[in-house]
Every structure is written in structure tokens, then in C-alpha cells.
Amino acid sequence: MADPSTAPSAGGPPPFTPHLWSRDGFNGDICVTGRPYPIVEYTAVTGPHVPQRLDLPAVTAADATDPAAPPTVIGRSVNGAELAISRLGAPMPHLFRNAEQDEMHFVQEGEFDYVTDFGTLTAGPGDFVALPRAVTYRVVPAAPGGLRIIVSTPAQVLLKPPAPFGMINLARDVSRPDTTKVSDLEGPVTLRVKAFDGVTTFTLPRDPMPLVAVLGGVPPVWKLNLASIQPLTYEPHGGPPDSFAETTDRDLLFYTLSSRTGARPPMHYNADFDELIFYFRGPGAYGELDSPAQLAWVPKSVGHWGPPEEVPEGYLAWLLESVGTFRLTEAGGAVAQLMETGEFGVSTATRGGA
């Protein structure tokens, strides 16, 4: 791919800006063209399919003051995926089990004990925690003020780096619950089971989570820190990132989008995936994203031009790609601003009609 920053030789083609059209994210058919100028600007927009930037710490999360409240959903996809925010300020007073969805939790701030059917997993900033469907759990924060981002999906989430070693050191960096640290609630115990038509509450005479031993198989709950996932690149000019986890139906793909070497990506029309970029922390900035827990959402087919990723100071970020088109809830819309798609800053374009 030509580097647009390189001046053309005498008699060569005129300067151009590369533009990528792609299917199946970065895994299907592609065509790269050279455009005479950037094509991601817009001056006005009307309708719901618009790029937006969300300040996630500003979400009014119900569980910040009521530990019995569920996480606050800020977005839903047409395929049944949900994006929620939790600011749990005290231990959950009940047990929880999701009968319909796998959950992937990302800890933005704080430290949490995930007490599960398979023991306890302690998670801190930058940790992804995978909680498959039908796992019982209870979350205990070390202190108030934490922030978690929760992705829920009807499909199974699998840890699927592109090679069995290299991108992720599975033996060193993927942790399972401590089976010697088990739940010890006194009965009666409240269990909430979430299904497609709401939450059902059970009262149990005893805590169902204590265990004596794991007799076979591997506990399905795991954690992995974003900083432990090595970004992939193609020297010397760069190339697309690769996913480290995905759903079995490939509706959701999870990527590291942390700083890496290489040229700026081309402008992009993503034909099949919404792109949701979560800026975790710096010190370096990713375009106009420079404050922790900022979300840049580009709906599928909307033109965008990812900022340069070779940032000497370094930054950590991750990308969620979703086949199902997302729309914000009222809680999500309350912290969203129209976004320009060249540096992911706040747009000055005018917006009409939701």
C-alpha cells in the first residue's frame, strides 16, 4: 500500500489518500483505492445512523447507589448484544446468573472480587473477565468509585487469538478462579436469573456456590489484561489488527487497538461491522481520545479514518466489532456527542432529527 506521505516521483501518479472497503471486518474481500482528498468529512447529518463519542464515566449508573440494581444498559444491537456500565459501590446483595447471554466485563477503574461457581477471581484495571452463560456470580468491589464496561451477547464468547502463542501467553496471562477461595454466604440466599423476558428471583435455603474440588474439565471463567495482549503489525507499513476473542457466530469480535508501529490506517468503509473503540488510558493520545473511558462508535458503512497508532508515549485501547447494528439507549444518548471521524473528536457538524 502506498504511503500518502511520500511525494510522488516525477511523472508518477498524483498524491492520493488511501481508502479501504472491506467485508467481514478485516477478514473478507477488500478493495483499496486512492482518493484525491479525504472523504470522511461531513457538515450536517439527519437520522440515527451517526458516529458518536461517549463519555462513559458520566453515565448515571443505578448500581452506584443501589448495589441491588443491574448495570445500566447504554446500547443494544439488533442481534441481541448489550453494552452496559456498572459503578457498583458496595457488594452485590444477591447472586446473579444470566440464562441467555455470555458476558465480557472490562475493568476500567477499581478492583473487584468475582465470586463464582468455580471460586474467586480478583480483577483490576485493564482486566477482561469472561463469564459464560449459566455461571453464577456475585461481584464485591474493594472500594466505591470503580467503573466496569459490560458486553453481553446471546452467542458463546471464546478466547481465540490468531495463533496458540505469541499474541497472548495463555499459560502466563490467562487466569482462572482461585478454587480455594469460595463463596460463604449464610442462607437464605437470593438468586436472580436473567432471561429474555425479564429477571426471575429465587430464594434458596443455602448458598449454591461453595465447592470442594474441580473433578474434571477447566473452570470456564477467565481473565486477561489488555496490557498483556500484544498488538500485531506488518512491518514496515502496518496492517489491520487481529481479534483475540470472538463469538462463535462471529457477531462480536474483540481486538486490542493499543499503540503499535506502522503507518496510519487507510480511510475505511466497514461493510459488515459497527466499530466501538474504547480508550483505556495513555499516556499517549489516540487521535482526540486522551481521557480514560472514552468510547468512539462508528456505525457500519460510515466513512472513518483511524488516527495514527504509532504514538511514542504509548496508549492502551480496545475495539469491539459488532455485526448487529447498535443503537444507544436513553442513558447512552445522555453522554453522547456527535463525532467527527478523522481524529474521533467532537464534531462541529449540525444534526437534525434522531
Image: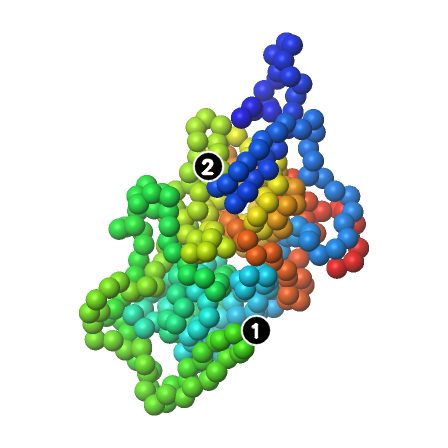
Quadrant, the C terminus:
bottom right
Query: In the figure, is residue 142 to the left or right of 17?
Result: left
Residue 30 in sight here: yes
Residue 57 in sight here: no
Image quarter of residue 115: bottom left
Image quarter of residue 127: bottom left
Question: Relative to 256, does residue 102 appear above or below in the rendering?
Answer: below
Please name the residue shown 48% across and 58% down the image: 108
Residue 108 numbered tag = none
Question: Label 2 amino acid?
Answer: Arg
Residue lying furthest top: 10
- Colour scheme of the rendered structure: rainbow
Question: Label 1 amino acid?
Answer: Ala
Residue 141 position, x and y percent, is 42, 69
Crowdedness of circle 2 by 10 Å Cα count: few (<14), some, many (20+)? many
Distance from the alpha carbon under mark 1 to that under mark 2: 37 Å
Residue 260 numbered tag = 2
Please name the residue shown 58% across and 31% down the image: 32
Going from the N terminus, do you reach mark 1 or mark 2 first?
1
Please name the residue shown 78% across and 58% down the image: 353
Q: Nearer the viewer, residue 209 or 156?
A: 156
Q: Which residue is mark 1?
A: 62
The answer to whether the residues at label 1 and label 2 have Cβ atoms under 8 Å apart is no
